[in-house]
Image (cartoon, grey):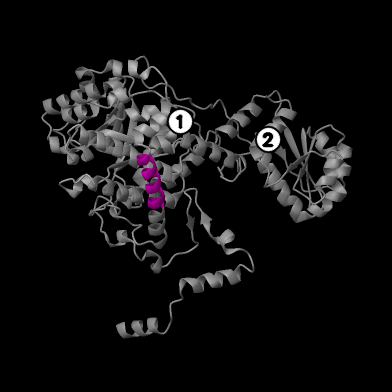
Amino acid sequence: MADSKEKLFSDFTAPTKQEWIDKIIVDLKGADYQKKMVWKTNEGFSMEPFYQKEDLEGMAQTNSLPGQFPYLRGNKKDSNNWYVRQNIKVTDAKEANTKALDILNKGVTSLGFKIPAKDMDAAYIETLLDGIQAEAVELNFATCQGHTLELASLLANYFTAKGYDANKITGSVNFDPMQKMLTKGKDTAALLPNASTIIKALEKFPKFRCINVNADTLCNNGAYVYQELGYALAWGNEYLSQLVEAGVPVDQAAKSIKFNFGIGGVYFMEIAKFRAARLLWSHIVKKYNPQCDCACKMYVNATTTTYNMTIFDSYVNMLRSQTETMSAALANVDSIVVTPFDAPYEIPTDFAERIARNQQLLLQEESHFDKIVDVAGGSYFIEKLTQSLAEEAWKLFLSIEDEGGFLAAAKAGTIQNAINETNAARHANAGKRKEFMLGTNQFPNFNEKSEGKTPIKSGNCCGSHRHDQECEKPYAKIEASRLASDFEDLRLQTEQAAKQPVAFMLTIGNLAMRQARAQFSCNFLACAGYKVIDNLGFETVEEGVDAALKAGADIVVLCSSDDEYAEYAIPAFKALDGRAMFVVAGAPACANELKAAGIENFIHVRVDQLKTLKEYNAKLGIK
């Protein structure tokens, strides 16, 4: 049998990559291969439509194994089990404790507590953690940065008093003063020396990390993947460098750092991001000459992003976060937080939180994602994507180091300005539908209303507990805004108008073209919250205009073929006689003639959708 298989393989010559490309070019029938088939990423590199084994030649990572340096294939080698984490914003310690105990019985294996600094003392911690077996669950804590040292001491005393095995205590305290430089523009540099003291307070607990790199801040504010990764590396290196300079042994310093990444919506890119992150971080730590390679492991908590979440058609957020969770799980992260689907507009309900938990549990208990280690390993495409992303992120890391490091770059506003520019570019692309958001700028739910949903605005996490060094705002800050926010503001504006605008499709002429353009126009205009009325077709433009006026149309959209617009557009415009806004669906060759006749409005795939809809609202008197 073996001989027959070998003979079968030898009878066929494997085609080379160039032979495949030549075949594709023939099938393209003259179309440009680069434009049609090659994907240009936001990260600045190009991805081919297919890859072969030869594309992996020279990649050192393909020779490594899971659980081995440089940890590209994951820190674990026996399983891919990760912590299912749910965060709790604590307002009352007893209530938070009750909730924590409840969700621990529903599949959660990691808790995140955000504690108000004003309430913190030993009794408060005792109440919060009552009945929770700290050796059996990952525990994570956050509070005002100026009180993190106090929190660390309280926790150390609590764990010790309870007699817990220090080697079994797993979790983190979120000390990351540089995050506030980015998000608030505040000078928190005076808090940085606390890092080594916090490590000292928790040194008895080797698996309890206390220095955090909150790179999810970048993801949630629109950063491209290479930016989140490159800046996160520089961020972590800044802390590592400062800790070593403060006398903390490099192994201890590296093992005290935890990375919190966001998970964006580009599925394979996110898998590559986490793999590249471990690869690059391991090499950074290695340069500090740790005694053990285990210090080079990157510990990652991944949180599904809020950036692409929407208020309208919000159940689609579940689909977004599910694919994001899958990419992080397949990339072998250590813990995952699924953001509840209603987070953009309300404090998550019990239902939303249950769904978020179950999204992870389904992957573990039904899809068995926790049983496979580095399932992406050896995939020609993902390996190439990992390498390309690592190269771009490394370039960015080096540029930040050349500027003097992450702290210097944050003080100079380099990072904040870059993220804001990216965010603005992505918003512009969304406005032009170059970046799609299902239910927002593409295929909206025509009949959906906000039903009182409004965007939640982020506030000051420290409340009245400010510190002198945080009072001024000497630095640039990241301007937060979800990608859908512009369209949502527009749609909410329309909802609050005295009358919902009615857009009527005047379909006439070529059947295929009028239907296609009516469908496009309905989707285009419904994104502003307009009521759209489609039609099967009219024999004359006069008949269509009469039907539109009878329906109370504020906008009449002529839908036909380019050739027929020369015949129908001007008569329809004159028949309407200014009684409603007149729009032509398309960009016909006769557009200049139509404009000369007074027709101003055209919608097609090349127009800026957001800008156009804002102009229409203004013309309709909606402000």
Q: Earlier in the sequence, mark 2 or mark 1?
A: 1
Inspect the image, locate mark 2, and give the three-letter code of the amino acid beneath it. Answer: Leu
Mark 2 falls on what kind of element? helix
Q: Is residue 350 above or below residue 432?
A: above
Q: Quadrant of residue 380?
A: bottom left
Classified by dominant secondary structure, the portion drawn in magenta counts as helix
Check the image and report above or below for 431 versus 2.
Answer: above
Callout 1 amino acid:
Ile
Question: Residue 613's mark?
Answer: 2
Q: Which mark is residue 478?
A: 1
Q: Residue at horizontal 21%, vertical 28%?
A: 198
- The front one of 459 and 560 is 459
Spatial CA span between label 2 and label 1: 27 Å
Neighbourhood count class around disc 1 (C-alpha, 10 Å): few under 14, some 14–19, many 20 upward: many
Q: Secondary structure at mark 1?
A: loop
The answer to whether residue 214 is seen in the rendering is yes
Left or right: where 308 falls relative to 273: right
Is residue 347 found left or right of 275 in the rendered image?
right
Q: Residue 619, position in %: x, y?
A: 74, 29
Q: Position of residue 541 (x, y in %)?
A: 86, 44
Q: Which residues are magenta?
A: 389-402
Discs 2, 1 touching: Cβ within 8 Å: no
Q: Quadrant of residue 384?
A: bottom left
Residue 392 part of the magenta-drawn span: yes
